[in-house]
Image (tube, grey):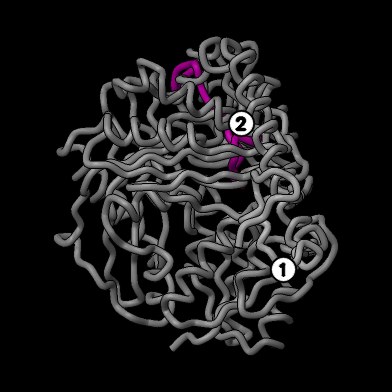
Amino acid sequence: MIKKVLIANRGEIAVRVIRSCREMVIRTVAVFSEADRSSQHVRFADEAYFIGPSPSNESYLVIDKIIEVAKVTKADAIHPGYGFLSENAEFSDRCKKEGIIFIGPSAYAISTMGNKITARETMINAGVPVVPGTKEAITDETKAEKTAIRVGLPVMIKASSGGGGKGMRMVKDKKDIKAGIRAAKSEAMASFGDDSVYIEKYIQGPHHIEFQILADQHGNAIHLCERECSVQRRHQKVIEESPSPFITEELREKMGEAAVAAALAVNYEGAGTIEFLVDKDRNYYFLEMNTRLQVEHPITEKVVGIDLVREQIRIASGEKLSHTQADIKQTGHAIECRIYAEDPDNNFMPSPGTIIHNTQPSGPGVRIDGYVYPGYKIPLFYDPMISKLITWAEDRPSAIQRMKRALNEYKITGVKTSITFLDRVMNNKEFAKGIYDTHFIDENFDELIGSSSDEKSEDEDIAIITAFFDYTEKLSKLQSIKTFQSNGGISPWKNFGRKKGVTRM
C-alpha cells in the first residue's frame, strides 16, 4: 500500500498529481528549486523540500537529490509527472534499487521505447505498422542518400533520442540530403547528447493521433481510445481533442489493437501513449511511444471517466486493472487548449513576468489544470505553459462553443498569453469542420497570427484597466476597515455612498 508519494516535478502536473493523491488519502511530498519557492505545488503538498538552484540540471534533473529527499521523508513511491526524469531509465532503475516504487514503467521499457530506432525494430517484430525508412542509425551518408531516394522524397531525418521536434529535418531535394543529415545530427547531439539519426518517409497530409494505454503487472493491457493532436507548431502540440474527427470506428478498433500489442511487446506497466501518424488515406504508422503520462491526458479522462493518475498509483501498488477493454466507452467530446505565457503575434516568444490578474473560467463542462495565481512570477527556466483549459460537451460543436465561451472568460494580465490565438483557432472554419492536419497552423498562419493584433491589444488593455480598478477598490475598502474605530464603530459598508457627516444606525 502506497501511503506517501514524492512528486519529482513542478507546476501544473505536480498540482494534478497531488489532487489525486489527496482523494486517495495518500500524503504528498513536493520538491522545488529556487525559482519555485512560491509555486502552487509547494503550497499544496503536505511536505516540501528545496533541491537546488533554478536551472533544471541543478535541481529537477539531479537523481541523487530526488532520491535523498524520498529517503528523508520516507516516501513509498515517486511520481515523475512528465518531462524532466519521467522517461529516464536510469531514474526508474535507481528507484528500484533503493526500494522506492517508481510510478511508471520499468527501465527496460523506457530504454527500449525511448530510442526510436530500437522502438521501430520492436514494433516491426510485434506486427505494428511503421513508417518506411531505415532500420538502424545512419553511419554512411552516401548509403543514407540512396535509402532516401529508394524510400521516396520528401523524407524526414529524425534524432533517435529525445523529441519535441529537435534533431528533425524535412528534406525535399536530393541535393539537400547530406546537409540535412549533418544538421539533424548536430542538433541531436546538442539537445540529447546522442547524434544518432535515422530516415523516415514523409507522410503526406499527416494526422498525429495517439492512443492512451494502461497495463498492469499481471499481463493485462487496454487502450482508452484516441486523442487527435494535429494542431501543432514547430512539432509541438497546441490543441488536442477526443475523439478524433478524422478516424472511423473501424480504424479506431485496428489502431487500438495495435497500441495494446505495442505495450505488451515491452511488458509495459502503467500509463503510456502510443503515437501514430495517419495519412490522408487513413493508413496508420507507429511513430513513437511516450512512456509516461501525457500533457493532454485530461481529455481522455473526460470522455472515458477514468482518473489516470489514480490508475497509475493502483498499478504501481501491484493491483490489477480496474477496467477491461469492454468497459471502455467514449462519451461526448473533449478539447484541451494549452495556455502558454508567450506572444503568438511575435513568433510565439516566451513572455515571463509577474501575473497581475488571473480570472479563470468555470461553469458546466469546464476544467482548468494550472498553477499560477495573481502575484506569481513565471520563471525563465522552464516550459512557458501555465495551464491547460479543458471543455467537455455532448458533441464536438458544443465542445467547441463551450471552449469559445471559456476562452472569453479567461483573463490574464501582466504577461502575454496564447488565449487570443487559441480563440482564433476555435473560430476557424476548417477547424470547426474537423478538416485539418499537422500543417493547419502553417496553412492558416495569416488568419491565426496576424489579423487580430489590434483587437487583442484592445482586449488586453481593457482587462488591465479593469484589474487595476478592482485592485484600487480593494485597497480603498481595506483602508475603510482600518478606520472603522475612528468612525465611531459604524461599519464602512453602511457609510458607503452617504453624504459626509450623515450616518444611520
The answer to whether the residues at label 2 and label 1 have Cβ atoms under 8 Å apart is no
Total tally of numbered discs in the picture? 2
Residue type indicated by callout 2:
Met
Percent across and percent down for residue 473 are: 70, 45
- Viewed as shown, does residue 409 lie left or right of 311? right
Percent across and percent down for residue 260 are: 29, 56
Q: Which residues are magenta?
A: 149-167
Residue 167, picture quadrant: top right
- Label 2 sits on a secondary structure element that is strand
> Which of 200 and 503 lies nearest the eye of the viewer?
503
Percent across and percent down for residue 505 are: 60, 63
Disc nearest the viewer among 2 and 1? 1
Q: In which quadrant is the N terminus drawn?
A: bottom left
- Viewed as shown, does residue 31 lie left or right of 370? right
Q: Relative to residue 37, is residue 172 depicted above or below?
A: above
Residue type indicated by callout 1:
Gly
Crowding at dot 1, Cα within 10 Å, few <14 / some 14-19 / many 20+, comes out as few
- Label 1 sits on a secondary structure element that is loop
- Residue sitting at x 71%, y 53%: 477
Check disc 2 and report the residue beneath it.
168
- Residue sitting at x 23%, y 68%: 323
Percent across and percent down for residue 2 are: 47, 85
Check disc 1 and report the residue beneath it.
489
